[in-house]
Amino acid sequence: MQLDALVSNLDPHKTVLFLGSGTSVASGGLTAAALAAALWADLIGGVAPSEDLTELSSILSNRVGRPALIGCVRKHLSTLQPTGPMRALVGYQWASVYTTNYDCVVETACRQIQKPIVVIRSNYDDYQQIETTGHMPLLKLHGCLSQDVVDGHHGRIVITEEDYEIACEYRETMFRRLAFELSTKNVVIVGHSLRDPHIKLDIVKAAELKSKQGAPGRITLVIFERDDDRAQLYERKGISVCASSLEQLTEALARESEATGRPPLVQSGEGLLTPRQAVCTLNTPEESQKKSDTKRLFHGGEASYADIEQGLTFTRTSEDRIVDALRTGTRRFAVITGVAGVGKTSLARRIMHRLAKAGLISWEWRREFAFRAAEWLKTDTILREQGKAAVLFVDECLPFMRQVNELCARLVRHNHPALRVLVTANHAQWVPRIKTPEIFRHGIIEKLSELNDAEIADLITLLESRQDIRNLVPAKFNNMPRMARMERLRRRCKSDMFVCLKHIFSFQSLDQILLAEYAELDPTQQDIYRLVSFLEAACGTVHRQIVLRLVDIFATSLNQRLAELEGLVDEYDIDPERGIFGWRTRHTVIAQVLSQYKFADEDEVTETLRAVIEGINPTIWLELKMLREICGSEWGINQVPNPEVRVELLRRIIQIVPTERVPRHRLITALLELEQYDDAEFEIEDAFKVVRRDPPLERYRVRLYIARALHQPGIMREDKTALLRRAERFAQEAIARFPGDKRAYLTYADVGDALARVAGDKSVLNHAIHEMQRASEHLLDPDFIETMKIFMRRHGF
């Protein structure tokens, strides 16, 4: 391939840059063979017996020890300084940069041009930074000079044969991201010999996928020395080859960039949003002008802004109160909770639609993306400077609760914040979460339940006024007198959840409706539908690549399959530039019902969960979010009845993402339930070391000592008392460290209750009750206050 042909269609935003040792030579680095010779000369003396760096390093590690080997590597590579071409190359906003180099040339180059990056060296690094910062990721597949086991780090420089053998343990996540990006983007490999068998295998597999199954993008190998024979071998495997120096490559990129001009950044909201915010939000007026879909809404889809604009929804009783509070600014925050399927999202969008009509700028955050409070605080500043008001809607906010807390707590520091916040959440999951008191002090809380009489009357009025809806309702219902229809809907909505219009108007149960639809599909369509339903129920948001990993579908046949499943499974854009497209059913409740019936076999559930976990790519934030959902959702690992299997699955997740808190929390909970106290104690201590302290870990440590005191056989009363005294001390430390954690006070009260039963000492219980009462005054959480009252009544206070 000619260099001009390579750069003419190259868009760095959609391209992965893969750097080998050849790119560091101009900066003073050494080729693998030269480094091998230098290490041998320094540590042994004389001529090295081999040019193979891995083999030679293994010998040196055995003869002089790993500390001496790593120290010598650092001596030769730690002083490298990037050249102008390297600074120019990393100056582009590549989708990702991968390197097998140990040196810090890329990091230094980015620092010199003041370009922020996220550096990932092993599974123990925080992959969330890639999404939460938006900075270009640099993934160092063979480790970094800055980290090795000789220094006490979990990660290591991959240089000996032993390092290569165990590298997958702590670099598995990086290779999963690499495999994903190789199959979804353009890839340019510069200065790499492809001698690493693991990397070569991934690249060849990706090339085959692109050529045979229609995966997007192309793979190009840039070699510094022309080699026609090797080029032909790679081109037969679907890999293009281009001979160029680093200087020629960067010059050609610069020339092409000047000729075409920089791609314009996405702008939205009259300059109020960053390009990332613009991509990750829905603008209410713009969404209202799109095409409505009566049939999808009738069959269970959430009401879109277009549906609301076209009058396809009905009023909820609490709607006026929330609209007035947010419009006038008397309340800065609004929270809508309720069970899945009760209409939280549709109500919130009706509120947003009305606020937009009233003149407020209205945005909805797309829950497929990580939420950052800092971005919206800047937007609030701009709004105040311009004298404007806006409202932000965060649907199903619990995955972002820390950021939502931070945003709300900091917004109220201004007497007149311009940004108001509306959120929805599943009520059962909302109750135990830590919330900033500012949400209750400056907010309005609405728990949505089944339809009431006024809402049912509005629904029947909607039916009577809209022929397109009447056409979808059974004639038997349409022909009933209005009062009879009212009574029928009253019974249905009181006894069963409001999930979709078809369900409440029908004379069949929701289960019957869904199973009849499923039975009409052919086997291939059924396989896709049941899998998407299972994944949506267990993991939340699903995207195309997850499905392709689990079902044998050619990329070229995707459109046909989706067309066949229209109205049952839909694809929508999440991040097209990164090759991420969402798949969803009409509603989460519908996905849960189908999953319950079509994955009734325990072994199949376990194997499917295992396959999802093994195929997950946690460097993609959306998939990391799915992994957390698998751990916490009742439709994820919690649906596996065998506790030993649950523990096994959770341990595997921790192995893949050791810095994630949620799977560690769930594992410790499972071990306590199994009364495996020694294992639970080990996991708590290990979590303290890896992810540091957090409120749940502090509580689990207290619960461990309570459980040992109350349930561990063969210990005397005085020993039980001693264990509970330790639990008391830990509970007090937890409250002091995390005073905003309402469950810490309840756990302290549990210690007091246990001491009262075991030792007859009520002093701790009395103190815990006092602390709970004090906490309720500043936490302001009504659920906590109600729980405290129940606890006090139970104990006679």
Image (cartoon, rainbow, N blue to C red):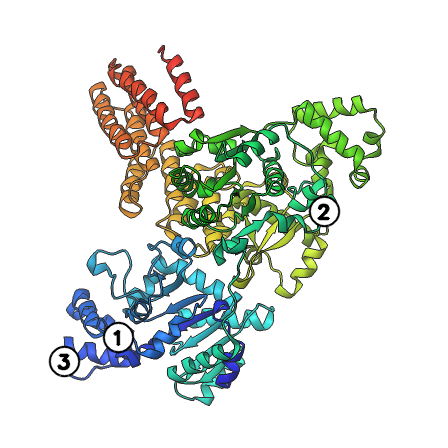
Question: Comparing marks 2 and 3, which lies closer to the viewer?
Answer: 2
Rendered location of residue 796, percent (x, y): 36, 10
For the residue carrying disc 1, how many other residues have a C-alpha within 10 Å: few (<14), some (14-19), or many (20+)? some
Residue at the spot of label 1: 81
- On residue 293, the disc is 2
Quarter of the figure with residue 703: top left
**Neighbourhood count class around disc 2 (C-alpha, 10 Å): few under 14, some 14–19, many 20 upward:** some
The residue depicted at 36 percent of the width and 38 percent of the height is 668
Find the distance from the CA under tag 2 to the CA under tag 1. Answer: 59 Å
Q: Earlier in the sequence, mark 2 or mark 1?
A: 1
Instruction: Say above or below: 368 vs 74.
Output: above
- Helix, strand or loop at mark 2: loop
Residue 50 shows up from this direction? yes
Task: Return the mark for residue 45.
Answer: 3
Tell which of 605 and 207 is nearer to you.
207
Question: Which of the 4 image quadrants contains residue 167?
Answer: bottom left
Q: Residues within 10 Å of mark 3 (few under 14, many from 20)?
A: few
Asked whether the beta carbons under mark 2 and mark 3 sit within 8 Å of each other, the answer is no
Q: What residue is rendered at 44% in x and 29% in y?
A: 440
The amino acid pointed to by label 3 is Gly
Q: Single out the mark in the foreground, 3 or 1.
A: 1
Calculate the distance from the C-alpha at mark 3 to the C-alpha at mark 1. Answer: 27 Å
Mark toward the start of the polypeptide (3 vs 1): 3
Coordinates of residue 380 in the picture (x, y in percent): 45, 46
